[in-house]
Amino acid sequence: MPGCSVTECLSYSRKTKGTDIIYHSFPKVVKVQKAWIMKCHRKDRFIVATSTVRLLHFTSDDYLRDLRAELLNLPPKKTLKPDAVQSVNIPESVPSVSGNSGPDDTVSPNRADRLRARKTMKNAIEHLASVSPKKRKIYQSTATDDCDTDSKQISELCKRVDELEYRNHRLTAICANLKCSEKCLKLKVKACGDKIKYQQKCKKKQVQEKVTQILGKLFQKHR
């Protein structure tokens, strides 16, 4: 899921889906790429090749003019200039989080919470994928007041999985009924097509007989 790499920026594609917000990949030019990394003010490790920065961190002067779009009155393409560097809504400093092993592992509180939540959610989903429905009920029944946040999330995920399974069963049944209806409709269409062909054949035969009858009368008069 692409998201903005600027620290303290909580934008990501799923959150901004359906809007005009787009995300730019890091440039290949090493000098400009380093400038982007510095402007992100990140103290944690992240993969530059798969990271992005949202367009709201750039000014209008950072983009190339789309003359074709201007002439045709179309939305312009958001193409950054080769030397463009993000400069809008950039934090001046990033507070460190205690308890980390070194400066490379230091992250902002917001990003640390997001990473922790994503990791917890991923582990819970992977765990639930291998758990039978009976064991899910056991997880729900054994949940106590002193459970930590992870256990509560697992309990909520169990309920969500049960709801989705029930919905899946209903949709499967609906699909089966629709397939049955589709088969019946195809048979009716085929029957109607055969009936039309038969009627056309009969009509053609009647016309031929009528023409033969008329021609026969004409030949008899000329004899």
Image (spheres, rainbow, N blue to C red):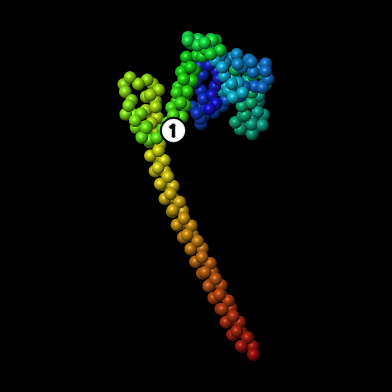
Q: For numbered disc 1, what is the local secondary structure?
A: loop
The residue that appears at 44% across and 33% down in the rendered structure is 129
147 on left or right of 12: left
The residue that appears at 47% across and 23% down in the rendered structure is 119
Hey, what amino acid is under mark 1?
Answer: Ser
207 on left or right of 119: right
The residue that appears at 45% across and 51% down in the rendered structure is 179
Q: Is residue 89 visible in this depiction of the protein?
A: no
174 on left or right of 88: left
Q: Position of residue 110 (x, y in %)?
A: 47, 16
Q: Which residue is mark 1?
A: 130
Q: Position of residue 24 (x, y in %)?
A: 60, 24
Above or below residue 215? Residue 194 is above
Above or below residue 197? Residue 105 is above
Q: Nearer the viewer, residue 130 or 207?
A: 130
Farthest bottom residue in view? 223
